[in-house]
Amino acid sequence: MADWESAFGELLVARGSALRSYAYLLTGDPAAASDLVQDALLRVFSRLRVGTDVVQLEIADQLGCAEGTVKRHLADARAKLAAQLGTTEESMR
C-alpha cells in the first residue's frame, strides 16, 4: 500500500465521521454526504500527489508569483496536513 493510501485511510478513520456529518448538513442526504466526502478527499489527495514542476509553474503564473513561492506554500501546506493527520510529510508523498 502506498504511503498516501495509508494517510488517506487514517484520515477517514480519524475524521470521516465528522466530515460526513458536515457534508450531511450541506446535502441533507446520508448517501450524498458520503459521496461528497469521498470525492473531496480524493481530489485533495490526488492534487497533493501531482506536485510536478509544470503544475507549480502554472500555479505561479496564475498567482503572479515565483515558482519558489508556490513550492514553499505547498511544503507548508503538506506540513500542516501531516500534523493534522498525525503522520509525517514523507509518508504523504
Image (cartoon, rainbow, N blue to C red):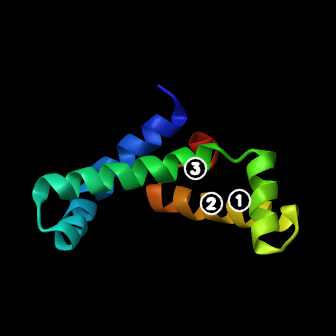
Q: Secondary structure at mark 1?
A: helix
Quadrant of residue 25 within the rendered picture: bottom left
Q: Is residue 40 left or right of residue 88?
A: left
In this rendering, the answer to whether 26 lies above or below 56 is: below
Comparing 74 with 26, the one in front is: 26
**Callout 2: 10 Å neighbours few (<14), some, many (20+)?**
some
- Dot 3 or dot 1, earlier in sequence: 3
Closest to the observer, 71 or 54: 54
Residue type, numbered disc 1? Ala
Q: From the viewer's perspective, is residue 16 above or below residue 46?
A: below
In space, the residues marked 2 and 1 are separated at their CA atoms by 6 Å
Q: Amino acid at mark 3?
A: Arg
| Label 2 SS | helix
Q: Residue at x 39, y 55 (%)?
A: 40
List the residue tagged with mark 1. Answer: 75
Question: Is 58 or 3 nearer to us in this picture?
Answer: 58
Residue under pointer 2: 79
Proximity of marks 2 and 3: CB atoms separated by less than 8 Å: no
- Quickly name the residue at label 3: 47
